[in-house]
Amino acid sequence: SEEYTKTQNALCELCKFSPNQDEIHKILRARQFIEDNFQNQITIPLIAKQVGTNQCYLKRGFKEMYQLTIFQFIQQLRMNAAHDLLTNSKLTIQDIAIQIGYSSTSSFSVAFKQHFGQSPSQIAEIN
């Protein structure tokens, strides 16, 4: 519910990332897990469970260590992979969208254009 989300966000504000070796290791493992699985539908609860920390701590620690939110990091990985596939493969835009974790070609195209300032088809045409 919306009220639950507000409460969770308020609690997350209280969560302070105090980087000790164990917590840094969890954030590093989270990053590796994301890099290995960015093309799947991964969620913050799933990542937190995978590395053995809570969601608030994961979000706060990730942002402090990498200056990106987890969502921004996943987007960056997906967009870079898409750009690479557009320039180095003969896959269709639809196939690339699916391969990097988008169920909709149109939402992929919008995200790609926001990220690179050009549409996937403009990049594909160049190559």
Image (cartoon, helix red, strand yellow):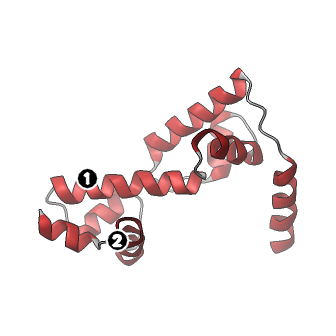
Percent across and percent down for residue 24 are 66, 29
Q: Amino acid at mark 1?
A: Asp
Tell me the distance, in whole angstroms, between the alpha carbons under discs 1 and 2.
16 Å
**Callout 2: helix, strand or loop?**
loop
Badge 1 is on which residue? Answer: 84
Badge 2 is on which residue? Answer: 117
Instruction: Name the residue located 49 percent from the left edge and 53 percent from the top edge.
Output: 74
The one of 126 and 46 positioned closer to us in this rendering: 126
Relative to 79, 65 lies left or right = right
Quadrant for the C terminus, please: bottom left
Instruction: Name the residue located 51 percent from the left edge and 44 percent from the top edge.
Output: 34
Q: Residue furthest top?
A: 21
Relative to 83, 114 lies left or right = right
Q: Amino acid at mark 2?
A: Gly
From what the image shows, is residue 14 above or below residue 108? above
Percent across and percent down for residue 75 are 47, 58
**Callout 1: helix, strand or loop?**
helix
Residue 39 appearing in the image: no
